[in-house]
Amino acid sequence: MAPPYSASIDNVQKLKNSGVSPAKVGEFASSSDKGNVNPISIRGGSMNSPYQKSYSKYVEEALKQELSLANKMAPDAAVEISGKLLKNDLDASGFSTGVADIEARFIVKKSGQVLYDQVKSVHHEWPSSFVGAIAIPRATQEYPNMVQKLLAALYADQAFLEALK
C-alpha cells in the first residue's frame, strides 16, 4: 500500500499566499494508457493506492488536503478543479537510483466554462539500492513526494492561479 498523502507545507503556503478564491475538487479520472499503471509494480510486488485503490483518487485527495489546509476549499464553490491522471509509474529496479514519472491533466471550470486546461508532468529520482529490502520501502515512501512535486508544478503555473481568482 502506498503511504497516505501528506500535504506539503510549501504547497499549502503557496496557495495561502496566492490570493486565489476557494474552489471545490471534482472528479479525477484515470486514463488507460500503458504508462498509467495500477497497481504499481515494485520489484515483483505491487503497490496500491490507499484511496479506493485508485491513483487518480490519490491526486484528488492530495489536492483536497492542500486546498483545505490553505483554507481555499469550499464544497459549494463556483470554481471546480478536476482532471485526469495520464501517466503514473515508478521504477525501483536501478542499482543506485529509483525513478518515477507522473503526468496529469488539470481542468478548472467556473459555471461550466473551462478557464484552465493544462497537462503537468514530473520526473522524480531518489537514491536507491540494489538490495530489495532497502529499495522497495524507499520507493514506496517516495510516491507521496512525487505527487507533492506534481502539485507544486501546478501551483507554480500563474495561469492556474489566475483561473482560481
Image: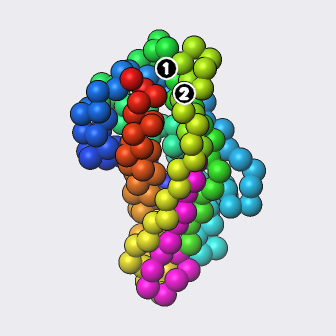
Give the label, 2 or 1, closer to the camera.
2
The relative height of residue 45 versus residue 133 in the rendered view (above or below) is above
Which disc is residue 143 wearing? none
For the residue marked with disc 1, what is the amino acid? Val
- Tell me whether the residue at label 2 lies in contact with that at label 1, contact meaning CB atoms closer than 8 angstroms: yes
Q: Which residues are magenta?
A: 92-104
Residue at disc 2, secondary structure: strand
Residue 65, image x and y in percent? 38, 35
The relative height of residue 43 versus residue 145 in the rendered view (above or below) is below
The residue under the point 64% across, 73% down is: 44
Residue 90, image x and y in percent? 56, 66
Disc 2/disc 1 C-alpha distance (Å): 9 Å
Residue 42 horizontal side relative to residue 74, left or right: right
For this rendering, which residue is in front, 57 or 100?
A: 100
Q: For mark 1, what is the residue?
A: 79
Residue 154 visible in the snapshot: yes
For the residue marked with disc 2, what is the amino acid? Leu
Residue 140, image x and y in percent? 47, 63
The relative height of residue 154 versus residue 33 in the rendered view (above or below) is above
Residue 162 horizontal side relative to residue 91, left or right: left
Which disc is residue 115 wearing? 2
Mark 1 surroundings within 10 Å by alpha-carbon count, few (fewer than 14), some (14 through 19), many (20 or more): many
